[in-house]
Image (cartoon, grey):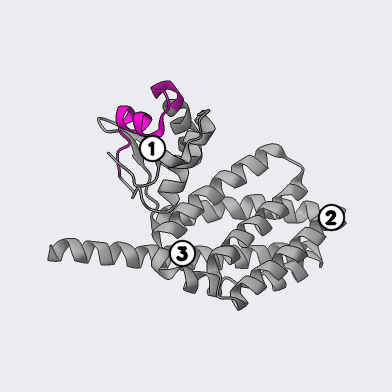
Amino acid sequence: MTIDGLGARIQRRSTAEQAAEAVRQAILSVRLPPGTPLRETALAAELGVSRSTLREAARTLESEGLVRYQMNRGIVVADVTGPDVADIYAARISVELTAADALTEHRDPAIYRKLADLVDRIEHAFDQDDTATALDSDRLFHATLVTATGSPRLRRFHAQLQQEQRLALALAERSRRELGRTTDDHRRLLDALHGSPSEASAEITAHLRAGAAELGRLLDLLADHDESEKSRG
């Protein structure tokens, strides 16, 4: 198995994290599509790392929801479906409601400043038709919000959820602009976070539910399209 340009990502001093990052980017760019088996010997040789280093990298990617172990197939690139998206966002709502409660209680000015800066970046990116930057800034906005919890465990869990969401977005690549536009309401969300806890909670719930519905719809349309193409073939 050869993945164009993948081997060049590993520097002279290879590490499990470097290997994980190289494969992570190949998955998120869909150069490694869902269901692709990761052949241990061939991939380790291509990356220039040992098989034990590759296994460690694979465990990292599994913890992020990007690969899975399957009986009789070994490690394969994970898929994300409409029901998966609903589950990811339900978990995100739980974490981010906790974060909103913490932020509206303690009113940390540093977090508010970072959130305001990210809203500006999101809006500027959309003005420049730079959807990739807008979506990256979206992820940073929500990750910054979760820092208000003060919990490293919640931050790690939330980061895993966001990584799985990135895979879903990559699979719905054809519709990323539409998705970004329909969820571009961070200014309203920031205003709510400056308000009462109940206002913040209501806006976060509405914001994330809208994102889940749109992304789930796009993945369902993509699945229907792929199924139709298979029947024609």
Q: How far apart are labels 3 and 1 at the CA level?
A: 22 Å
**Circle 2: element type:** helix
Does the magenta segment cover residue 52?
yes
Residue lying furthest front: 12
Density class for disc 1 (Cα within 10 Å; few <14, some 14-19, many ≥20) is many
The answer to whether residue 91 is seen in the rendering is yes
Q: Please provide the residue range marked out in magenta.
A: 36-53
Please, which residue is most extreme toward the bottom here?
Answer: 127
Measuring from the top left, give residue 1's x and y in whole percent.
27, 39
Q: Which residue is mark 2?
A: 110
Disc ID at residue 68: 1
Q: Position of residue 22 (x, y in %)?
A: 46, 41
Instruction: Measure the C-alpha gap from mark 2 to mark 3.
Output: 31 Å
Question: On the picture, is 108 further left or further right than 152?
Answer: right
Residue at 20% in and 65% down: 229
Question: Hey, what amino acid is under mark 3?
Answer: Leu
Q: In the rendered image, which residue does mark 3 sit on? A: 215
Q: Are marks 2 and 3 in contact (CB under 8 Å)?
A: no
The earlier-in-sequence mark between 2 and 1 is 1
Q: Earlier in the sequence, mark 3 or mark 1?
A: 1
SS class, disc 1: strand
Q: Main secondary structure of the magenta part?
A: helix
Position of residue 27 in the picture relative to residue 129 (left or right): left
Q: Is residue 209 magenta?
A: no
Marking on residue 16: none
Q: Find residue 105 and report its image quarter.
A: bottom right
Which secondary structure, mark 3? helix
> What residue lies at 41% left-to-right and 64% top-to-bottom?
173
State the residue in front, 184 or 131: 131
Residue 207 versus residue 101 in the image, above or below: below
What amino acid type should be assigned to the residue bearing mark 1? Arg
